[in-house]
Image (cartoon, helix red, strand yellow):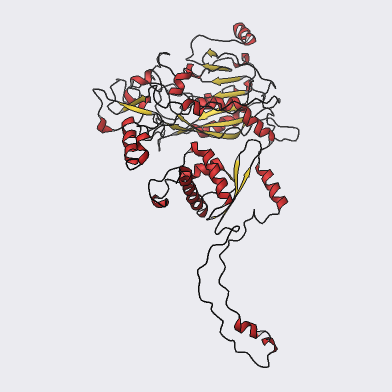
Amino acid sequence: MSVEDKLKLVASASIQSLFSKESVTTPVSSFDLLTHIIASGPPPAGLLPHGGPVPRLRLTDLSRFERILERLSESWDQGKITLSKEEGDGELTVMDVQLGAPRDGPSPPTQTSPVRRKRKRIVDEDDDSAVGRAEEEDSPEQPEAAWNPPPSTLESLSKTMKEVYNLMQRSTAKGRLLAEQFRSLSGSFEPICAHITKDDCAKARRALHSNSSSSGNMSAICDRIHFRPLLRAHTDPGLGHCSYLNTCYSEPTYAQSPSIPPLPSHRQNQYNAQGQGPVSLPSGLGAGGRGKEKAPCRYLHFEVDWDVNDGQGMVDHRQVARKRPYKLPIGLGPLGKATTPLPPQWINCDLRRFDYSVLGKFHVIMADPPWDIHMSLPYGTMTDDEMRAMPIPTLQDEGLLFLWVTGRAMEVGRECMRHWGYTRVDEVVWVKTNQLQRVIRTGRTGHWLNHTKEHMLVGVKTVADAEGRLKFPDWVNRGLDTDVVVSEVRETSRKPDEVYGMIERMCPGGRKIEIFGRKHNTRAGWLTLGNQLGPDQIYEQDLRARIKAR
């Protein structure tokens, strides 16, 4: 039995289980259905007819999973699957899943049983309704037919209505063009081995394939990223992992880079490379927040264990072929044309006393304010009244505001948005992971629970039309990204880089400003304001002239 046949059994059993429990509803894309199958857990042990280890589906098996779905749609012993495939991008959608005996195809064989005759019915001789009783007396009892489930709502529709339904489920041509235009070509996602170290990975693979005949051709470790433990003189492995790992304030790695050494894809792109300069520790905090004395942390820490022989050919496998770009003028942002962003710009200033009128107008504002969340923090904070007094409204006539909030600031931030003249339209959640790509166990904020996430409120400048309805900017690209970002925690107050990409896809081009930024926040196409940025760097000639003349 081939691997695909085994995965077909796994997919069939998982689909039957998910839809019988009503954990999934149709229509559902093939990718979403695959994620539900993976999240439902490992398949049952005795699934294969001849025994042996049961394979598991992975996200990288999407194309194989779609082939399995097409095979199941032709013949499935658990029921019937209806698929729909778009002609443009080939996206496969499961339109309907009907459990039970299949309607089409040969009926299942029935067991041979003796024909039973009905007992002779006693009737009144004067009753004329006894006509045809001779046929009833001698007619054999028909065997019960195989059970067929009632038709689903989609199956009961006419052919024309099914076509209309399929058209309604497809995305618009503009939406597909926008998604294709802003598709990531080569993401920096690096899958992490669940066994963490190479030794544990090799042991697990040997134990799994000890009885397999092909184990001799199998590599010793998987092609994912591994880590090696950092064992120093003061390390006590019996204590377990440090809750902060590479973000522990007492770790030397924290003062060098968020990930030491950097991941292979980052090394190729010169991201977070060693030697770019130290990152200063937050003032007033020492070893993991235990005081000013920088005592060494005795818990276990890790670093990336990677060499040039690991994962040969993986980079080429993960590259996405670039398609010929469309030349339609859509999704180009407020300027209506493609522009080259200026280099990073920043102004070092006291944000409470700075004259914001010299900056001009912006299409996008992002702010990570130092909210007073009633906790001891490694930086100065601003009171609620000082936040309300921020002249945010002077920076926009129309546009988007992205405001980071946490703790009690989630309510204060909403109040400030209304006070500044904005309408909250959405919210982004950043789920924080640690160096091992697992959800952090101990956040540095939270009164009642340890916070493992942060929120970013999305607001639109409140501009109403003549009839009093909220007017949205027509240059914003909607529906390109999701509202959840899963990313690794780095230095204090540093936000994930994925957020910048999300904002730049919503608003290509245009002027963008980030308030309360630090040096690691500076980015091409953005103007950053903060009090830890060093000498000013400005490339806009008119802005430089206005600041010089103030």
Q: Where is residue 467 in the image (x, y as percent from the top left)?
A: 75, 35
- Residue extending farthest to the left is 233
Nearest to the observer: residue 517 or residue 104: 104
- Occupied quadrant, residue 493: top left
Q: Where is residue 291 in the image (x, y as percent from the top left)?
A: 31, 23
Can residue 25 be seen here? The reply is no
Nearest to the observer: residue 129 or residue 378: 129
Answer above or below: position of 145 versus 236.
Answer: below
Can residue 362 be seen here? The reply is yes
What residue is rendered at 58% in x and 20% in y? 513
Nearest to the observer: residue 259 or residue 247: 259
Q: Where is residue 309 in the image (x, y as percent from the top left)?
A: 39, 23
How many discs mark residues in the rendered view?
A: 0
Q: Where is residue 550 in the image (x, y as percent from the top left)?
A: 61, 8
Answer above or below: position of 547 versus 508.
Answer: above
- Residue extending farthest to the right is 466
What residue is rendered at 66% in x and 93% in y? 125
Nearest to the observer: residue 118 or residue 489: 118
Q: State left or right for residue 152 relative to residue 438.
A: right
Q: State left or right for residue 522 relative to residue 198.
A: right
